[in-house]
Image: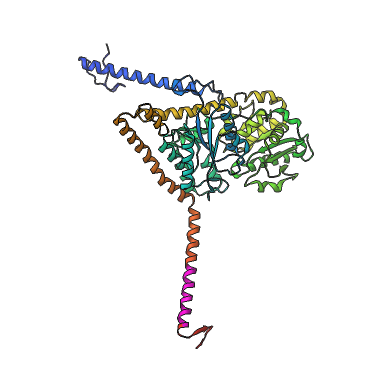
């Protein structure tokens, strides 16, 4: 028997005794429904934990093997269409990630079609995919250092043809202003769309000093872009939490990363003479390096000031700035300066040369609070070299504090100096190479590709369930469904036609957003073009007036010469 329920309790019943069978049945049904809902939530949470795996305090990178035994997430090769705004020969973390990812997908037997803006695509990337589709691109006024696909009908046609030709089962796109083009094709052809976010665009625009309306607009458009996708994927648990605060819900799985052990390993220290080069002939001094794109958001000047402080105290510390970018010219004049202790020759090194540098120096450092994933830290630790960086974003998930390096308080010079002094005095005792390597033993290629393929399958399964709910087969497989008798009834045809309309309407809505994005991204250029056209119109009007006046005077047999009139 169910006891009397007091007013105001969690069940919300009155204080009357349950004296009638109908009241008893109602109470029992509500209790049972609540219990079933609770069990369903617990089962869902357990499934998410099983898919994500256990953590070691740094995030969902050291995941246990993912359970692929679920029949709804069947294994096997998949057909994928992948777009990345960065691919080699472009140099950045996103380019490195996708280059290795495409290679691993090929090794597992997946069929991949790549959409790219790079005309001179890296030969290794080209050999890792089945088809390559090039789209036209342009530099944006607000961030001229990077190109993105043009929002044109020509590019839309190319992407559409690529989707139809590849018969893609899932579409994977990086977040960028051209996302509406891919969304239109995905919705119209009913292809699951997964969006991956690699760059903290809001912070990037703030660091570049862009106007606050542009920064706020970018922060508003990012969630809008992910709402239309079937799933959103990112690279680290820390950045996933930041995105959640901005209204972007990501998968519980995160991509992670790895450093190729065939390239990055401690044995590279015996190659080259990098200690002698980077210290200007003082190989026994303490050498600190930072590597990557040299741009304002990387905060290289923090490390320059840190090294200058130590050198003013008599410590023989050198800082090598390796890489290139818009801010490289600011540090190049410091090259060879005894007071600054800076080595800076703008230019990127090959992966082998970078591995030799990592393995040769004492510490690899960064002051950037912008990194969504710490690739530089991971590659350095794979060479047995400890890392020194801020306790921010991706570094928190990559670097085990006290095992693979130290994490100081972001933008705190005193904290950074404290940990650098510890490394300066007892670097070999605190961080032997074997300990540093053990701290990243779970960052492997197999874990990365399994998590990402699992995310693909989750996206495809989510779309399949949505279409199956209404009895609608994916657009690229409707012919197969009809051959199997799925379209035999008139009701099925009507239902499929209605669902096709429902899929098409959001795609048509994207036409408005394409126009809006194009106007916002090209607003300064449009303003300049309008000003030029106005100036040209004024010049044309003046020239027309002058010609008309000369014609009038000539018809009167008069020619104006200065202030005289000649008849």
Residue 113 point in image, percent of width and height: 53, 35
Above or below residue 333? Residue 472 is: above
Would residue 151 be seen by someone viewing this image from the given angle? no
Residue 128 point in image, percent of width and height: 59, 33
Would residue 57 be seen by someone viewing this image from the given angle? yes
From this viewpoint, which residue is outermost toward the left? 20
Q: Nearer the viewer, residue 434 or 542?
A: 542
Q: In the visual, does 420 lie left or right of 222? A: right
From this viewpoint, which residue is outermost toward the top? 1
From this viewpoint, which residue is outermost toward the front? 483
Q: In the visual, does 300 lie left or right of 44? A: right
Above or below residue 52? Residue 87 is: below
From this viewpoint, which residue is outermost toward the bottom? 567
Residue 138 point in image, percent of width and height: 54, 48
The figure's colour scheme reads rainbow
Above or below residue 209? Residue 291 is: above
**Residue 359 drawn in magenta:** no
Residue extent of the magenta highlight: 538-554
Q: Nearer the viewer, residue 156 or 305?
A: 156
**Residue 553 drawn in magenta:** yes
Q: Nearer the viewer, residue 174 or 440?
A: 174
Q: How many marks?
A: 0
Image-quadrant location for residue 418 = top right
Image-quadrant location for residue 463 = top left
Q: In the visual, does 150 lie left or right of 353? A: left
Q: In the visual, does 363 lie left or right of 70? A: right
SS majority, magenta: helix
Residue 409 point in image, percent of width and height: 59, 34
For the point 57% across and 38% down, the residue is 370
Image quadrant containing the N terminus: top left
């Amino acid at each position: 028997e169910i006891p009397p329920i007091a007013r105001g309790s969690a069940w919300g019943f009155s204080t009357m005794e349950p004296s009638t069978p109908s009241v008893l049945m109602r109470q029992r049904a509500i209790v049972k429904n609540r219990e079933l809902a609770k069990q369903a939530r617990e089962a869902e949470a357990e499934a998410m934990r099983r898919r994500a795996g256990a953590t070691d305090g740094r995030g969902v990178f050291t995941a246990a093997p993912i359970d692929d035994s679920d029949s709804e997430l069947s294994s096997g090769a998949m057909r994928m269409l992948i777009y990345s705004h960065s691919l080699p020969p472009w140099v950045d973390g996103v380019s490195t990630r996708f280059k290795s990812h495409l290679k691993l997908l090929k090794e597992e037997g997946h069929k991949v079609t790549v959409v790219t803006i790079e005309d001179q695509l890296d030969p290794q990337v080209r050999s890792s995919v089945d088809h390559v589709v090039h789209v036209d691109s342009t530099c944006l006024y607000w961030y001229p250092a990077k190109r993105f696909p043009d929002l044109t009908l020509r590019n839309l046609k190319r992407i559409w043809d690529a989707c139809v030709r590849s018969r893609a089962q899932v579409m994977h796109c990086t977040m960028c202003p051209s996302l509406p083009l891919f969304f239109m094709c995905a919705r119209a052809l009913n292809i699951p769309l997964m969006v991956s976010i690699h760059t903290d665009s809001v912070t990037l625009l703030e660091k570049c000093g862009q106007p606050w309306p542009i920064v706020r607009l970018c922060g508003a458009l990012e969630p809008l872009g992910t709402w239309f996708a079937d799933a959103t994927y990112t690279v680290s648990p820390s950045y996933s939490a930041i995105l959640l605060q901005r209204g972007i819900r990501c998968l519980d799985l995160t991509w992670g990363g790895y450093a190729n052990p065939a390239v990055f390993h401690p044995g590279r220290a015996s190659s080259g003479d990098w200690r002698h080069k980077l210290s200007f002939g003082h190989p026994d001094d303490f050498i600190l390096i930072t590597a990557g794109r040299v741009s304002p958001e990387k905060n290289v000047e923090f490390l320059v000031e840190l090294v200058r402080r130590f050198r003013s105290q008599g410590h023989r510390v050198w800082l090598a700035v390796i890489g290139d970018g818009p801010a490289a010219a600011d540090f190049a004049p410091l090259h060879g300066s005894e007071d600054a202790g800076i080595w800076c020759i703008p230019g990127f090194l090959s992966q082998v040369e970078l591995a030799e540098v990592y393995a040769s120096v004492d510490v690899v450092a960064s002051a950037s609070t912008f990194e969504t994933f710490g690739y530089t830290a991971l590659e350095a630790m794979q060479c047995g070299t400890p890392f020194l960086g801020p306790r921010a974003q991706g570094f928190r998930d990559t670097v085990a504090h006290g095992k693979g390096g130290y994490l100081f308080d972001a933008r705190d010079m005193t904290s950074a100096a404290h940990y650098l002094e510890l490394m300066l005095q007892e670097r070999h005792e605190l961080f032997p190479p074997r300990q540093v390597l053990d701290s990243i033993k779970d960052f492997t290629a197999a874990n990365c590709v399994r998590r990402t393929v699992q995310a693909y399958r989750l996206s495809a399964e989510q779309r399949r369930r949505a279409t199956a709910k209404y009895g609608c087969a994916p657009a690229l497989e409707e012919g197969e469904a009809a051959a199997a008798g799925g379209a035999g009834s008139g009701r099925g045809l009507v239902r499929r036609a209605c669902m096709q309309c429902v899929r098409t309407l959001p795609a048509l809505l994207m036409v408005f957003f394409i126009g809006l994005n194009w106007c916002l991204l090209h607003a300064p250029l449009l303003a300049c073009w309008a000003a030029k056209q106005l100036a040209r119109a004024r010049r044309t009007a003046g020239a027309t007036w002058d010609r008309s006046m000369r014609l009038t005077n000539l018809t009167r047999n008069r020619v104006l010469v200065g202030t005289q009139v000649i008849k």
